Amino acid sequence: MVTGLAIALVLLFAAGAARADDRDVVAASINQFIVPGYERLAEEAGLQSDRMTGLCAEPGEAALAAARVQFSALVRAWSQMEIIRFGPIVADNRLERMFFWPDRRGIGLRQVQVIIAEENPGALDAVTLRTKSVAVQGLGALEFVLHGAGAETLAGADGAFRCAYGSTIAGAIETLAEGVAADWLAPDGIAARLVDPSPDLVDYRSEAEVWRELVGVFVHGTELVRDTRLNPFLGSGDDSEANPRLAPYWRSQLTLASLAASMEAMRSLFVVSGLEEALTGDNRFAAGAFIFELDNFASAIVGIDPDLEAALADQDMRVRLRYLVILTRSLQNIVVLQIAVALGVSAGFSALDGD
Amino acid sequence: MWDRRTFMRAAGAGFAAGLLPAGAEALERAEAIIASACLKPDGKFGVVLMSETGRIISALDLPDRGHDVTQCLATGRLVAFARQPGTFAVVLSRQGEGLATIASAPGRHFYGHGVFSPDGRLLYATENDFDNAAGIVGVYDATDGFHRVGEFASGGVGPHDLLLSADGRYLCVANGGIQTHPDFGRTKLNLSSMQPNLAWIDRDNGTVIAVQGLPDVLHQLSLRHLAAGRDERIWVGAQYEGPQDQIVPLVGAASPEDGFAFAHLPDPVTVQLANYVASIAALPGGGEIAVTSPIGNIAVILDETGRLLSVKALKNVSGVAGTRAGFALSTGDGVFRANQQAAAVMPGVEFDNHLFLAG
């Protein structure tokens, strides 16, 4: 297990031109949110791996239920961290291997079904699994294993291959998460570069670029939730266009739990980093508005039926789901038009959102 | 190229008289005009026409955010395209009056770039056949209300900029390789498997005569913007979608016969471009190429052998156009800088990615 000690030392002795306050925000983002978040993800993936091993060794309803419960913890842990879309997680297609979404044409799903139907032995080995499509090695594939058509076989001997495949996936996720956490903890790694940007570096040459990365988490995180999680299943037009099967994690009914976790993570990062405090004077209102809307999101999503088919059939819940979309837009506007500007990050539309 | 006298004749006295004094003065001095999509001070998206020194001649509202502009050299008319995944293109006169709006076909959206045939009769636009994740070049009849008369495959996914070859026979399309679908906004759907290329397409029949791909290690290097250089070469500016701690080449040049080759910029300059070239432009007579990066806050000028000539620092610089006086630059903060002149600041204006030099 990795620890935060190495990075704490790096930060303690870091020297450079950055203002202390700025550096504190960056260091807190890393030490209080990013590193513990990936460590937690690795732990949840390790537990998932244990549950799968247990299920495969002694198949049964109770063991299957335990594996499914752990899957929900794993999805929450990832949904918190997926708002971070820079650094080690984007190297080596890790982001896509962890969770390939959206999978618009269901290609990943078909590949997973073929692996299970043909009992492809290559999918049972972590090394060969990695050479396969990104869509068959992550949370989407594991969800199908645990909740897709035929998942009930996991409780008996007929599900042996399916279980072993799920176990391999869980192990791959654990390895991936540990790798990401280790990269964040490397003494001369990304954490040191973010804290001490320098013109000599390839990725972070100035404090402005670091701020841009950090503020970008909120800009792109709110957009991600809206454009790839909510809108696709809600449809842009009238309610007849809604299709719960276009939602991520609909099979496990974890769609809303995942969304809530991503938005909670934005709140955590915003608060623990000290960004909230860094906004002073009139800009405090922008910080307040951001938190207010995040809290609105959290209250609105509570009580919506996790079974999206049922939720979409209910007038009140449909309205609340659409309200979530409005909130993501409002949150993104607050970040782009107020917070980014207040922090001196060029909200300039080319730089933050180029083409 | 349209000169000022032709323009004044075409525009008629009524137009010049109707301009505000500052606008009329800008027009009087204008030799060529520069067009740019922008966010205006009133908070609306639009397209502005400026003199080469950055004096605004006209501003026209667009239905939503625009991207690049192109021009018919036979009639002088301009077309401003919606930014992807937008569905409109607005035809405007060289005086900035809106003439028509082209709507994208069902199942298609624009990518933001287009080019006219040399005789001005046809307009080609990069488009997305989004349900099939296929790049398309849409063909419009500019002599007949810009009706869509056909389309052909762009030779790749996510076509962005396109240009005519030097002899006017081929279209060179930068297939950026990035799959998007309007159901998911602007989300990049295939970063792990993208395969960008440059495709050369026979305009007469849509045949792809050459496809220039990249080595596997650069499969996440999105080829996006183009500028015509000397010797029938087309210059390419790229954006890297891979890990940001890697140094990859971002500028290159290609011809159908000789293939694609990267320019060898010094690593520190490549690093400053921050894996993101927003725009690329050539001087009208050729010889020099400029690329911009609003992330690195620089414009880099090279000669056509790929040798570095200069690096200009300018915050949030993105738009660039080659004018007879050198390169003009624009920024997301409303700064316009003609070559070797003091920067003009237009408060409240945010220039979008591209400047287009209109004849």
Image: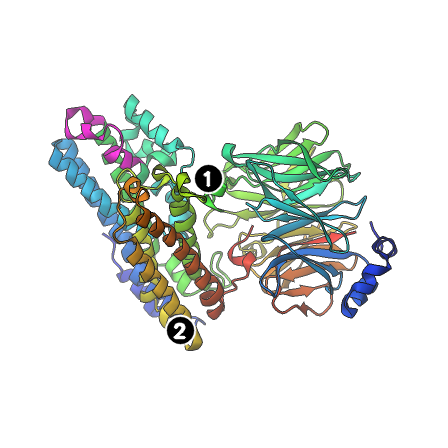
Mark 1 and mark 2: Cα distance apart in space: 39 Å
Farthest-out residue, front: A315
Q: What stretch is highlighted in magenta?
A: A141-161
Q: Which chain does the residue under circle 1 lie in? A: B
Q: What residue type is labelled 2?
A: Arg
Q: Decide whether residue A160 is among the magenta residues.
A: yes
Give me the disc on residue B190: 1
Q: Decide whether residue A217 is among the magenta residues.
A: no
Q: Position of residue B225 (x, y in %)?
A: 63, 46
Q: Name the residue under label 2.
A: A284
Residue at screen point 54% across, 53% down: A354
Residue B191 visible in the shown view: yes
Q: Position of residue B232 (x, y in %)?
A: 74, 40
Q: Where is residue B348 in the image (x, y as percent from the top left)?
A: 60, 67
Residue at screen point 66% across, 34% down: B200
Q: In the picture, residue A298 is in which quadrant?
A: bottom left
Give me the disc on residue B223: none
Q: Which amino acid does label 1 sit on?
A: Asn
Q: In the picture, residue B119 is in which quadrant?
A: top right
Q: Indicate left or right for A239 with B63 as reference.
A: left
